[in-house]
Image: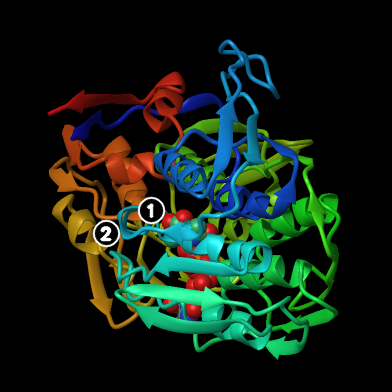
């Protein structure tokens, strides 16, 4: 198992190329199950979660091929990104997502809608709880049931079946915590091949939902209202393959924005979309961070006098839960007392204990954390517990006095492409060691 060794204190300066979005690529890869012909996807990041999804697709009879760019970026000269990924369905008889894969990657649930709509049956192992709390899939199942699918639970699996074609209907898809991102995508995919019109009320508006809708439209789907809480999907009989570029990863971008802020640095973040980060920019500006943009590049700098703020995570366009831990690392060094409330995953606070081990002063009360700013963070040996919590520890390590060791960085490899190389290139003292 790899660890990171980070010697804190370096001011980050330079340019970083943002990769394609993990959370967009995962459901889009699953949606390609519904296409006839060869789909080509650009800007798919190289991450262990993407490898897991490709493995699942291969088990489902799909041929997956990653082109080599010979180390050259598709979008910019100074950064080696990845070659396109081809996906072609060759055998439609398989329909099972096994526990061994679902256990390592919850986004396996994304195959539920596409498999039901295209193959009439799916068996998906029920994802258990995870480090960020309970992650039910009841809304996915309810939405697909409303389209006419029948479900039963069998040996830890959800077994879904459709007799004939799914049928469009009007439905409400929200839950107690608001809309569901992957649930919306699952139902949208299934409705794209259903008979008649589906109206999805309470749909998630995240850019990743919009990206998947854009790709489905290229495949021949008839979708309107994506990016709003009410979507209309007129089912078609067939979907064809297409070529699509995944949107930039707004969470990776936000993480590097915070890296600039916490190190009192100056970063140029290339190939990103600031419109997707409007709430994040709003909070960072309140903290005292400078954010400007020019075309597809964001410039972030800070003079390291950080104001204490309040922040509540919300569905898009609100502040994303996936940047809550990273913002908390920054607020540890703010001048005064900050308050963070987590509305999406109320138990997503595993980073609190580890940040406190590095000298943070954070008190958790239910779904709220109260952060008393301190002058400095110290180095420590800490443990990565989930993807975004681990990113928060990396950020804290960049300013911690002395050498921080972060164990179990496989969590980070799930969602940040070459993070140590990108940070090293802008001046961080970080290295990966194998134990
Ligand atoms: N929920 C239900 N029932 C459901 C589905 C969701 O009650 O059937 C609840 C959840 O428990 C949560 C809320 O609804 O309280 C929202 O969850 P959502 O379904 O939107 O989450 P998700 O689609 O499973 C995606 C991202 C997460 C991100 C969330 C919220 C992917 C692969 N995952 O998960 O990303 O935190 O949306 O924005 O897209 C990450 O990248 O680190 C990550 C966890």
Q: Is residue 374 above or below residue 16?
A: below
Q: Is residue 184 above or below residue 22?
A: below
Judge whether residue 323 can be spotted in this image.
no
Mark 1 beta carbon near ligand 1 (under 8 Å): yes
Asked if the residue at tag 2 contacts the one at tag 1, i.e. Cβ–Cβ closer than 8 Å, the answer is: yes
Judge whether residue 29 can be spotted in this image.
yes
Left/right placement of residue 181 relative to residue 191 reads: left
Q: Which residue is tagged 2? A: 351
Q: Secondary structure at mark 2?
A: helix
- The quarter of the picture where residue 372 lies is bottom left
Left/right placement of residue 132 relative to residue 30 reads: left
Quarter holding the N terminus is top left
- The quarter of the picture where residue 179 lies is bottom right
Question: At 46% across and 34% down in the image, what residue appears?
Answer: 417
- Residue 388 is marked as 1
Q: Horizontal and vertical percent for residue 79? A: 58, 19
Quarter holding the C terminus is top left
- The quarter of the picture where residue 106 lies is bottom left
């Amino acid at each position: 198992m790899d660890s990171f060794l980070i010697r804190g204190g370096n001011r980050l300066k330079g340019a970083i190329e943002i990769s394609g979005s993990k959370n967009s690529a995962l459901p889009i890869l699953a949606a390609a199950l519904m296409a006839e012909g060869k789909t080509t996807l650009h800007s798919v990041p190289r991450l262990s979660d993407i490898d897991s999804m490709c493995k699942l697709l291969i088990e489902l009879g799909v041929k997956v091929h990653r082109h080599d760019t010979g180390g050259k970026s598709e979008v910019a000269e100074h950064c080696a990104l990845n070659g396109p990924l081809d996906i072609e369905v060759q055998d439609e008889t398989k329909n099972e997502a096994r526990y061994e894969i679902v256990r390592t990657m919850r986004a396996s649930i994304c195959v539920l809608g596409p498999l039901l709509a295209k193959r009439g049956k799916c068996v998906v192992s029920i994802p258990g709880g995870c480090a960020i709390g309970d992650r039910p899939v009841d809304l996915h199942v309810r939405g697909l049931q409303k389209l006419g699918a029948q479900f039963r639970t069998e040996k830890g699996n959800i077994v879904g079946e459709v007799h004939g074609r799914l049928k469009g209907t009007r439905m409400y898809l929200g839950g107690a915590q608001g809309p569901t991102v992957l649930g919306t995508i699952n139902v949208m995919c299934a409705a794209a091949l259903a008979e008649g019109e589906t109206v999805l009320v309470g749909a998630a508006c995240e850019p990743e939902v919009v990206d998947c809708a854009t790709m489905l439209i290229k495949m021949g789907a008839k979708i309107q209202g994506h990016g709003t809480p009410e979507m209309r999907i007129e089912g078609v009989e067939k979907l064809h393959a297409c070529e699509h570029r995944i949107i930039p990863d707004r969470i990776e971008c936000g993480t590097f924005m915070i890296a600039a802020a916490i190190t009192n640095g100056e970063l140029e973040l290339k190939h990103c979309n600031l419109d997707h980060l409007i709430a994040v920019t709003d909070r960072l500006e309140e903290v005292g961070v400078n954010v400007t943009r020019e075309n597809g590049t964001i410039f972030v700098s800070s003079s390291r006098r950080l104001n204490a703020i309040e922040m509540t995570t919300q569905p898009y366009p609100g502040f994303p839960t996936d940047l809550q831990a990273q913002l908390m690392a920054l607020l540890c060094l703010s001048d005064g007392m900050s308050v963070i409330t987590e509305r999406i995953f109320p138990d997503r606070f595993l980073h609190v204990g580890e940040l406190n081990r590095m000298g943070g002063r954070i008190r958790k009360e239910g779904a709220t954390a109260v952060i008393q700013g301190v002058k400095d963070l110290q180095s420590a040996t800490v443990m990565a517990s989930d993807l975004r919590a681990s990113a928060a520890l990396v950020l804290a390590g960049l300013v911690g006095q002395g050498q921080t060791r972060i164990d179990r960085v496989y969590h980070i490899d799930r969602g940040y492409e070459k993070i140590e190389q990108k940070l090293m290139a802008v001046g961080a003292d970080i290295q990966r060691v194998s134990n």
